[in-house]
Every structure is written in structure tokens, then in C-alpha cells.
Amino acid sequence: MTLHRLKELLELRGPLTGKEIQEQIPADFFDLWRYCNNCPDLILKTIGSRYLRLDKNVEGFARLSPSILREFCNYTVVGLADKPEALDARARQIHQEIIRISCKKQELAHSIISGIVDSRQDSALIREKVCFMIAGDVAYQMAHLEPRPESSTGEFVNGSDLDIVVVVRGLSESIIERLDTAIYEQKYFLMSNPGHKEEIDYVIKDLSKVQAQLDLWDFKSMVANKILEEGLFLYGSHDLFHEIKDLVKEKGIPEKLAALSEIAAQKRENARLELLTFSDSVLNADLRHLLFTTEEREEFY
């Protein structure tokens, strides 16, 4: 790959994402990322935000999402250094599209959950006793439509999943079981229907379990608490939603997560600098996970 060829492409097409460049100039993504970051004739602009992921495969569990290469492929625009206005315009366009995708996925999640609840005879009781929250990429307005394999079946789904947390208080086991069945049926329908190909990832738990998890800080509880902290209201009880958020604050979860985010950000920057000058033939495990993570979802607990 030569600078002349890349500059010709950017002159012709305007600023492009890393993925769009690779589609026109076939090259290893890692080499392309290093080349674009090290070339003084190019400027790069990253879109959206980086946010904490908890990953058992990373020392200390904390890393930032998107990973370095996924950020380059989908959330970074590369342009010519002498045309910054064009870069800014393309970045705004892509950012607006990412927000649109996130909003559409949130609307879909709301439609599914409200449809399930409103069709039931005990709908008023569920709206009073249950809070539905949405987390993950959608909550950060960073959702995407890149096809990816669903973890249990391997079938491809359309990008970011719908991470839904269902917290119940004072609801009978029979109602909870029927609610679980209804959500699972929708999960199967969305995944198998060619017109949707969306994945719902969800967990149902009682408020007492939430309280118990907030008192712990092992890996599973860290994941559960992070999801509660980032989660947005989707449907159901506003009162229960605010109670959960108050409990999260009382237990100091935002501060704990902020400390982990700082550690992850420093590790990310150290890895970025090392990778830009990398000369060894084999990446160590931590560098590999920070550079490119095939699995960008978290388990629910």
C-alpha cells in the first residue's frame, strides 16, 4: 500500500472509515490502522464514545469498547490533512447515523416489551411491579448494524443486541415465569425472522438480588452492577427505576466504575502507543484483546 494510492482514494471519495478504505485497498486492518495513524498527510477523527467493558480475558477485567480495531473500522473517519472541513462533515454524518440506529433499536425494544405487557390481563400489575431497562451499545448511542454471529446458534444477527434488564418487586413466581416465556418467545422470533435478525439478551431478577449484587464486587456482580448503572428506562415502573438508580449511587458503583474506566483508558493508550511501533511477530494476550475483540457483548448476571 502506498500513500499515493490512499491519497488518490480520499481525493476521489472523500473521507472514509477504516472499513471503507480496506474495501478499496485490501490490506491487513492492523497494518492499515498503523499506516493511517503514523502518516502526517492524513487526519483521523473518532466518532462517539468509548465505554467500559468487563472482560474475563483481560487482566483486571477492565477494557474500553469499541476495541482499537473495531473503532478504526466503524467509528473512525480518515481524511486528507489539508481538508479538515470534509472530515468534520463526514464524521457528523456517520455520528447521526449511529444515533439513528441506536434510537431505532431502542424503539424496537420498547415496542416488544410494551407489546408483551399490554397484551396480558395482569398488565397493570406488571407495570407497577416491574422495571425494564435497556443497556449496552444502545444505552451509549453506539449501536451498529454490522452482521455478527449470535453466541448460542452461530446465526448472523444485525449488529448490536438489545440488552434488557428486568427487575421485579413483589411479583408471584407464576407471573414471572409467564413473563420470561413471553420474552423468550420474542427473542426466538426476532432471531429467526429474516425481516428482523435481531438478538435480545435479557435477564429477570428480583430487587432483592439486585441489592445483594450491589454489596459484592466479584466479576459477576461487577458486570451486573455496571449494567444497572448504565441502563436507561425502557418500560414499566418509573418508581422502581429511580429506586434502583438510588441504590446504585448509595453503594458507590459509579465511582468504582469510573476508577475502572480510568485504568482501562490508561491501558488502552499504553497499548495504542506500543502497537503503533510494534515489531514482534506475536501479540501478547492483553494487547490482542485491546486491539481486536471478536466478542463485544457481556454476559448478564
Image: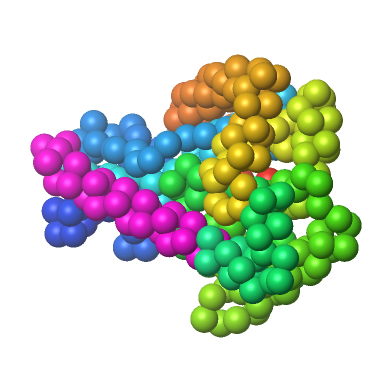
Instruction: Please state which of residues 70 and 218 is positioned toward the viewer in this rendering.
Output: 218
Q: Position of residue 10 (x, y in %)?
A: 19, 52
The answer to whether any part of residue 154 appears in the image is: no
Instruction: Please state which of residues 79 and 6 is positioned toward the viewer in this rendering.
Output: 79
Q: Residue at x 49, y 57 (%)?
A: 106
Residue located farthest toward the bottom when viewing the structure as drawn: 194
Asked if the stretch drawn in magenta spans residue 153, the answer is no
Residue located farthest toward the right when viewing the structure as drawn: 173
Q: How is the image coloured?
A: rainbow
Instruction: Please state which of residues 188 and 238 is positioned toward the viewer in this rendering.
Output: 238
Q: Which residue is drawn at 74% across and 52% down?
A: 203
Q: Magenta-highlighted stretch: main secondary structure?
A: helix
**Picture quadrant of residue 123:** bottom right
Quarter of the image for the C terminus: give it. Answer: top right
Image position of 217 (left or right of 268): right
Image position of 46 (left or right of 290): left
- Give the number of marks: 0
Q: Where is residue 198 in the image (x, y as percent from the top left)?
A: 58, 68
For the record, the magenta segment spans 81-109
Asked if the stretch drawn in magenta spans residue 98, the answer is yes
Q: Where is residue 91 in the image (x, y as percent from the top left)?
A: 26, 46
Q: Which residue is drawn at 83% across and 30% down?
A: 212
Q: Which residue is drawn at 77% across and 45% down?
A: 169
Q: Where is residue 290 in the image (x, y as percent from the top left)?
A: 58, 35
